[in-house]
Image: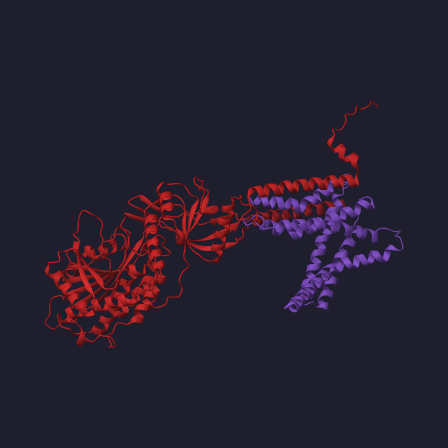
Chain colours: A purple, B red
């Protein structure tokens, strides 16, 4: 029954991508080429990020929040944004409307992300006899990630593909992009803050 | 330009092909990856599997892969796909006996032994519980050894992890819930290869020879006295059969006696006019097969020169009463001499020695005592033992209950004093005189730390003969020790008599997995299917509209192609 569990988690992780492709007009316009190209760009981006992280980041001994390391991580995350820009603007796509282009790119991006980050642990771990909730959580995470990537691609297309952007929205758009890029650092900062806060509360309590 | 393009494409196709083959190889490798991801892994020891004259005994299967269950069970429950976990402390022997005798199928049996006692307080008063536990273990062992069990039986030691698993299993069994995702469904898996017959099980006899003082005019062979003990064991769990009392105590006594006499014999002035032969024999539980082969290897002159032999068997936990077992009638002159020699020293030590006579029946292959093998070759021999009755086949051969804390070192000390003094008085001709050769606080005193050290070593080493190779460390250790104390050491390798055959795989690792039931997986599949269908409908609705959704389920209306 363990291959069964693997099958379940696999359709939870990768099913939504296939469903999205077949349900929306993407399948009618045959945009699979675009998605494939976006996936390839994601692969390249991931490799570059890996190399940069390995070269520039120091291994921290303790769990403290080091602003310089976090700054470095934020800069490297911008490579992500750059990759998305490349996929959206530089690649030559067939003549498909902007609407569908960002969806196809977002889908390809999210699919490559899921495959790279979640397929190997799923294959190796979910086939064992031992039951854990871990892989179901991973699948839910993949779903959320799909939504995130689609919105990222929408944001990107808004920023770079549209020629006539409404004036007032421009700073908001760029601010959102900045926040998204620094999101991991922000979450880490806040989690550490919470830990310190809770420890202080416990000390005050006792 | 076109040709270059084609060449480029051709090269591209080759590259693609090699990529495909690499990818296929990676997939094959990845499919073979199997991680050990158990929640718990425990050392377990398998019940022995053996045949006597082709009749199978013990547990016949080694691999285990079933769900765990614990008593109490509903009456009439089908347990053929359950591994029953039973702590020995709360063992219901009648339940187990009826299960085994009525040959009811079980998925497997896991017996949990009480925690190993790591430190032993010297002189600790043994509680009644210990005695009860020992009796339970003896009965359990006899039950399991003499049954033919078609499912795997394993022993494990209780610890916190296993106790937690057991409690969990009991809780979920009690509520009658089928095992769901996180509520108590456990699977016990032991994966070891099928047990194979041990091809030629060897028994190794080690003998040490201390020659006596030959006078100048002596042309005849000096008389010899032999001290013999068998060192191997047999028990329900061969990886746990350390046999501290049967016969670790005898081995230690023999080694200490050898050490004392080697000190006496090292100086020609104190060397006696008797040769001393020390024998550590193997094959004890199997009708003293090793002793027989050892004696047969003697040449005629040596055999005739043996005055008498003392065999030591289980001398580790007696208080006041020791027994000599003989096969010649007690009125026999030689036997009387030996008995009197031992009784004199016994009286001085304040203990009594009784004598028991058991006639040998030549047609019966059962050899209950080691001296019987000597008697069958017409050598006078006695066995000194704390057991008053002859043990049956494969009884009192050192098993689960026979551990270090069942011993009383003072008893071994007394036995060594007894045997050594009576031997010395016989050798040096001081019979009847009250002379203490091995007195306390003398240079020839019996050394308690020597006894303790060797007992510790023997109590840590399982010594079931078919699983001891020719070069096993314990055999080398015994050989080296004897060669320290004697002049000539000889090792003899033989194979066990064809009547007994044994099967390997005595220890394994048990993996305990927490598993979810099939129902859970099916439920999950249903939930996922519903989720994906909902997602699909939602997406179609929002991007293409309701009409498209309905059109998906309607057959496309047939259209007549209008003729142009």
Quarter where residue A201 is shown: bottom right
**Position in image of residue B184 (x %, y %):** 53, 49
Q: In the drawing, does residue B499 fall left or right of residue A121?
A: left
**Position in image of residue B481 (x %, y %):** 29, 67
Q: Residue furthest top?
A: B563
Count every numbered label the image shows and give the total.
0
- Asked if residue B262 can be seen in this view, the reply is yes
> In the picture, which quadrant includes the C terminus of chain A?
bottom right
Q: Residue furthest front?
A: A205
**Position in image of residue A30 (x %, y %):** 76, 41
- Asked if residue A160 can be seen in this view, the reply is no
Residue placed most toward the observer, B100 or A154 = B100
> In the picture, which quadrant includes the N terminus of chain A?
top right
Q: In the drawing, does residue B210 fall left or right of residue A203?
A: left
**Residue at horizontal 73 percent and vertical 50 percent from the top:** A109
Quarter where residue B342 is shown: bottom left
Q: In the drawing, does residue B482 fall left or right of residue B534?
A: left
**Position in image of residue B361 (x %, y %):** 17, 49
**Residue at horizontal 78 percent and vertical 36 percent from the top:** B546
Residue placed most toward the observer, B74 or B98 = B74
Give above or below for B486 relative to A40: below
**Residue at horizontal 69 percent and vertical 67 percent from the top:** A65
Residue placed most toward the observer, B167 or A97 = B167
């Amino acid at each position: 029954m363990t291959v069964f569990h693997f099958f379940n988690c696999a359709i939870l992780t990768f099913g939504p991508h296939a469903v999205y492709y077949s349900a929306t007009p993407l399948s009618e316009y045959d945009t699979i080429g675009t998605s494939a190209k976006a996936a390839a760009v994601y692969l390249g981006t991931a490799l570059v990020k890996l190399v940069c992280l390995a070269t520039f980041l120091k291994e921290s001994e303790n769990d403290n929040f080091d602003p310089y390391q976090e700054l470095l991580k934020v800069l490297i995350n911008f490579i992500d944004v750059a990759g998305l820009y490349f996929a959206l603007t530089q690649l030559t796509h067939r003549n498909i409307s902007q609407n569908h282009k960002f969806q196809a790119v977002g889908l390809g991006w999210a699919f490559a992300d899921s495959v790279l980050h979640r397929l190997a642990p799923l294959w190796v771990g979910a086939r064992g006899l031992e039951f854990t909730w871990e892989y179901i959580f991973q699948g839910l995470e993949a779903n959320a990630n799909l939504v995130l990537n689609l919105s990222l691609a929408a944001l990107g297309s808004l920023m770079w593909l549209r020629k006539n952007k409404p004036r007032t929205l421009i700073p908001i758009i760029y601010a959102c992009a900045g926040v998204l890029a620094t999101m991991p650092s922000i979450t880490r900062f806040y989690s550490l803050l919470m830990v310190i806060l809770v420890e202080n509360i416990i000390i005050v309590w006792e | 330009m076109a040709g270059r393009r084609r060449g480029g494409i051709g090269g591209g196709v080759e590259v693609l092909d090699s990529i495909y083959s690499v990818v296929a190889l990676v997939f094959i490798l990845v499919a073979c990856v199997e991680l050990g991801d158990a929640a718990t892994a425990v050392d377990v020891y398998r019940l022995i599997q053996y045949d006597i004259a082709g009749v199978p005994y013990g547990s016949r299967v080694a691999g285990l892969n079933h769900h765990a269950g614990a008593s109490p069970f509903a009456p009439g429950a089908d347990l053929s796909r359950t591994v029953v976990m039973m702590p020995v402390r709360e063992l219901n022997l009648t339940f187990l006996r009826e299960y085994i005798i009525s040959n009811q199928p079980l998925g497997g049996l896991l017996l949990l032994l009480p925690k190993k006692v790591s430190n032993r307080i010297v002189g600790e008063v043994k509680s009644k519980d210990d005695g009860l536990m020992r009796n339970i273990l003896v009965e359990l062992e006899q039950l399991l050894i003499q049954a033919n069990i078609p499912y795997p039986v394993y022993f494990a030691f209780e610890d916190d992890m296993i106790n937690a698993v057991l409690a969990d299993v009991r809780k979920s069994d009690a509520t009658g819930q089928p095992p769901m995702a996180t509520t108590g469904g456990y699977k016990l898996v032991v994966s070891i290869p099928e047990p194979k017959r041990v091809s030629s099980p060897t028994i190794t006899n080690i003998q040490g020879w201390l020659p006596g003082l030959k006078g100048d005019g002596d042309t005849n062979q000096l008389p010899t006295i032999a001290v013999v003990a068998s060192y191997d064991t047999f028990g329900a769990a061969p990886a746990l059969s350390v046999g501290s009392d049967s016969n670790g105590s005898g081995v230690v006594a023999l080694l200490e006696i050898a050490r004392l006499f080697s000190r006496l014999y090292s100086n020609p002035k104190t060397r006696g006019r008797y040769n001393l032969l020390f024998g550590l024999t193997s094959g004890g539980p199997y009708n003293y097969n090793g002793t027989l082969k050892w004696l047969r290897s003697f040449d005629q002159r040596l055999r005739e020169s043996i005055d008498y032999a003392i065999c030591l068997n289980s001398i580790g936990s007696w208080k006041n009463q020791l027994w000599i077992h003989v096969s010649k009638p007690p009125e026999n002159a030689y036997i009387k001499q030996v008995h009197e020699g031992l009784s004199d020293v016994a009286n001085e030590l304040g203990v009594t020695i009784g004598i028991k006579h058991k006639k040998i029946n030549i047609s019966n292959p059962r050899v209950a005592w080691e001296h019987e093998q000597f008697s069958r070759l017409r050598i006078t021999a006695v066995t000194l033992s704390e057991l008053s009755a002859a043990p049956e086949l494969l009884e009192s051969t050192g098993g689960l209950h026979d551990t270090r804390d069942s011993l009383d070192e003072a008893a071994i000390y007394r036995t060594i004093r007894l045997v050594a003094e009576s031997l010395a008085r016989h050798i040096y001709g001081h019979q009847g005189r009250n002379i203490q050769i091995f007195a306390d606080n003398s240079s020839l005193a019996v050394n308690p730390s020597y006894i303790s050290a060797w007992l510790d070593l023997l109590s840590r080493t399982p010594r079931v003969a078919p699983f001891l190779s020719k070069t096993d460390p314990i055999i080398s250790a015994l050989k080296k020790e004897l060669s320290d104390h004697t002049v000539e050491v000889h090792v003899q390798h033989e194979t066990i008599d064809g009547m007994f055959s044994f099967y390997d795989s005595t220890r394994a690792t048990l993996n305990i997995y927490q598993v979810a039931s099939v129902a859970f997986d099916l439920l999950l599949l249903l939930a996922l299917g519903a989720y994906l269908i909902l997602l699909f409908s939602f997406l179609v609705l929002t991007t293409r509209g309701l009409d498209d959704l309905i059109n998906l389920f309607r057959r496309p209306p047939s259209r007549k192609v209008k003729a142009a």
